[in-house]
Image (spheres, helix red, strand yellow):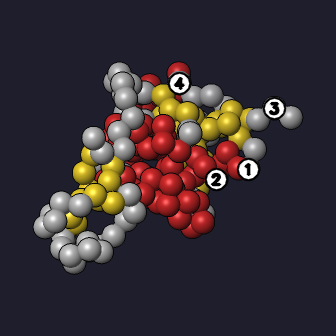
Amino acid sequence: MARVKCSVIDTSALLAGEQILNLVAGHLFTTEQVKKEVKSMECTLKLEFLESKGLVVLKAKQNYLKKVKEALGPASGKLSTADLSVLALALQLREEGYEPTVLTDDYAIRNSCNLLGLKWKPVRYRGILKTVKYVIRCKSCLRLFEENYAKCPVCGGEVEVVRKR
């Protein structure tokens, strides 16, 4: 059975307003967290316009947020709550029989889509050229870890998220 195409938009796509309608395939979705990021009158008007054109605002299920965080590992720390919700909703829609494409100009979301096997399209700016992976590095002993840790499991030092070389 053919999957129904849909588009999931993040805040950067929302800021483009009606321009994104040319990119939309099928149904148009966003998340409650993206809607909460809308503060200015201009953005509120763009959101209302897109809702009048069929934009559906959903809340991503918690188990999909957990899947995103687990799959991205340390890279999930580079994303906002709204960003994570967009990725979780795209995964959720894929499992519900849709073929989602994330519309975004956010490089961190594009990178995460590549890591999660999700399709994405740029809205106004060129796409990314390569996918970046992240690891946890201890600031004291400089050891690298693929898993997320709040503190270094070896020396107990403070950790940070860095690009994997």
Q: Which residue is mark 4?
A: 23
| Label 2 residue SS | helix
**Which sits earlier in the primary sequence, circle 4 or circle 1?**
4
- Residue 143's image quarter? bottom left
> Which residue lies most toward the bottom here?
156
Report crowding for label 2: few under 14, some 14 to 19, many 20 or more residues within 10 A (C-alpha). Answer: some
Mark 2 and mark 1 residues within 8 Å of each other at the beta carbon: yes
Question: How many circles with numbers are drawn on the protein?
Answer: 4
Judging from the image, what secondary structure is the residue with disc 4 in? Answer: loop
Within 10 Å of disc 3 (Cα), the crowding (few <14, some 14-19, many 20+) is few
Q: Which mark is residue 96?
A: 1
Which of the marked residues, 4 or 2, is nearer the chain's N terminus?
4
Task: Tell me the residue at 53%/44% (across/down).
Answer: 116
Q: CA distance from mark 4 to mark 2?
A: 21 Å
Q: Secondary structure at mark 3?
A: loop
Q: What amino acid type is highlighted by mark number 3?
A: Ala
To which residue does mark 3 refer?
2
Q: Mark 1: which secondary structure?
A: loop
Which numbered dot is residue 92? 2
Label whose residue precedes the other's in the sequence (4 or 3) = 3
Quarter of the image where the N terminus is located: top right
Q: Quadrant of the C terminus?
A: top left
**Are the residues flagged by discs 1 and 3 in contact, CB closer than 8 Å?**
no
The residue under the point 71% across, 41% down is 98
Q: Residue at x 57, y 52 (%)?
A: 89
Q: The residue under label 1 is which amino acid type?
A: Glu
- Circles 4 and 2, Cβ within 8 Å, touching? The answer is no
Judge left or right: residue 146 versus residue 141: right
Measure how far apart labels 4 and 1 are at the Cα level: 22 Å
Q: Residue 14, image x and y in percent? A: 42, 39
User: Does residue 144 appear left or right of residue 122 in this picture?
Assistant: left
